[in-house]
Amino acid sequence: MTTPDATNVLHSTQIVIEQALRRLGYSDSMVELLREPMRVLTVRIPVRMDDGTTKVFTGYRAQHNDAVGPTKGGVRFHPDVNEIEVKALSIWMTLKCGIADLPYGGGKGGVICDPRKMSMRELELLSRGYVRAISQIVGPNKDIPAPDVMTNAQIMAWMLDEYSRIREFDSPGFITGKPLVLGGSRGRETATARGVAIMIAEALRMKGIPLKGARVVVQGFGNAGSYLAKFMYDAGAVVIGISDVHGALYNENGLDIPDLLDKRDSFGGVTNLFNQTITNDQLLELDCDVLVPAAIENQITEQNAPNIKASVIVEAANGPTTLEATRIVTERGILLVPDVLASAGGVIVSYFEWVQNNQGYYWSEEEVDQKLEWMMLKGFRQVYEIHQTRKIDMRLAAYVAGVRKTAEATRLRGWV
C-alpha cells in the first residue's frame, strides 16, 4: 500500500523534472517520457523460513531510462519499501548519473522486509530469490544493482553468486558494492559519506566558513551518517548532534564520535544506550553551521524550515527536504546542496568498481578517492553555476544539470 509521503516524493520529483526540462526547451513528449520509469517489475519471492513456514515477500525493480547506457542503482531491504518510492529513487539515480556524467541511466530496487527480524540464512535465501526473480532484466550491460538501505557487501556477494549460477559464468560487473575479494572496489563502502564530506567543505567555502571548528549536526547514524560523522570529526569539525531511529544525542562542545562508533549496533543504533537524549525534531533545529539529513524522506518541511538555524544543508539522504521547505530555506539564505548532487559519491565509486571489473585492473584507495573528489567538485561547480546564472534554487539547478544528458540521448536515439 502506498504511503502519502511516498506519493509526495514521486510527485515532487516529477514537478521539478518538468520544470528542468521546460527550462532546457524540451517538448511535452519528453516530459511525459521522463516523468516515469520506462520499466517497473514487481516480483513475489517465496522463502522457507527457519520455523518451517514459507513466507512470500514482494520486491520491485524500476529502470527509469536507458538511453545513455545500462541502468544503475541500489537495492534496499526495508519494511516501508513500496513501488512509488522505488520509482522516485530510480529517477533520482538518473539525475545523479547525469550530474556526474556517468554512462548510466537510473535504476532502483527494493524488497518489503525487515532484515532486523531475519536470520542470516533467511536473508541469504531472500537475496538469492530476488536475483532469480529479476534476472531477465538485469546484467552488467543492462542494469547493475548495488547496496542501499539495510543491504551490504555480504548481500551483494550472495546476489552475485546467484546471478553467476543462473548465467553459468562469473560476472563481477553485474553488481557493485561487493567484498574486495569478489571484485569490489576500495573506497566503495565509504564513498557516499566521503562525497558528502567533499560537498560540505565546498559549501562552507562558498559561505566563508572554515571547516575546522564548524558545528555539524548529522541526522541518521547508518552507513552514510556514521562515516560522515567520523570524517567531520577527523577534519576538525565539531559534531554537536547525531541521531538514529531511537532518538538523538546533543553536546554543544562536541560528541565523542569514535566512542559512539564503537558502541553502535549493525543497523546504526546507539542513542538507546543513553539516558539524556533529545528528539529528532529538536536535533534538526539546533544552532549549527552544517545540517546533514542522512536518514529518510521528508524531514525538513514547511513546518520546521523557518526554524532551521544552519548556514548550510547538505542532503545525504534521498528526498529529506520537501519542495516548499526548499523554497523557504533558499529564501532565508541557507545554501542547500541537494541529494542528487550531495549523495552521488556512492554511484560514482560504483561506476569505478564496474570499470575495474570490466578491465580486470584494480585501483588503490588513494586513486579512487582522488577521482571521486575531482568528479564531486566538478558536479558541484556545474550545479552552483547554473544556480547563479539562471537565478534558480540549487535543487532545480541540480535537476537541470542531471536530466540534460538523458534527455539529449533520448532525443538523439529518436525516441521522442
Image: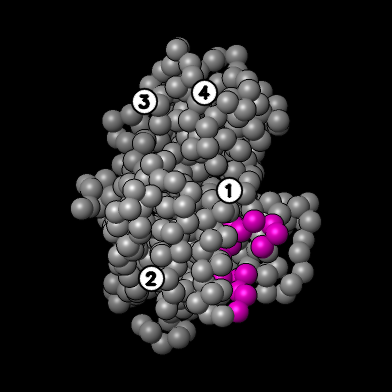
Residue 144 in view: no
Between discs 1 and 3, the one toward the N terminus: 1
**Residue 198 x/y as whole percent:** 64, 44
Q: What's the distance in space between the residues labelled 2 and 4, CA to CA?
A: 42 Å
**Residue farthest along the front direction in this orientation:** 52
Dot 2: element: helix
Quadrant of the rendered image containing residue 193: top right
Q: Are marks 4 and 3 in contact (CB under 8 Å)?
A: no
- The label nearer to you, 2 versus 1, is 2
Q: In this figure, which residue is indicated by the disc labeled 1? A: 192
Q: Amino acid at mark 3?
A: Asp
Q: In this figure, which residue is indicated by the disc labeled 4? A: 241
**Residue farthest along the bottom direction in this orientation:** 414
Q: What's the distance in space between the residues labelled 3 and 2, CA to CA?
A: 40 Å
Label number found at residue 281:
3
Q: Magenta segment, which residues? A: 169-182
Q: Is residue 166 left or right of residue 285?
A: right
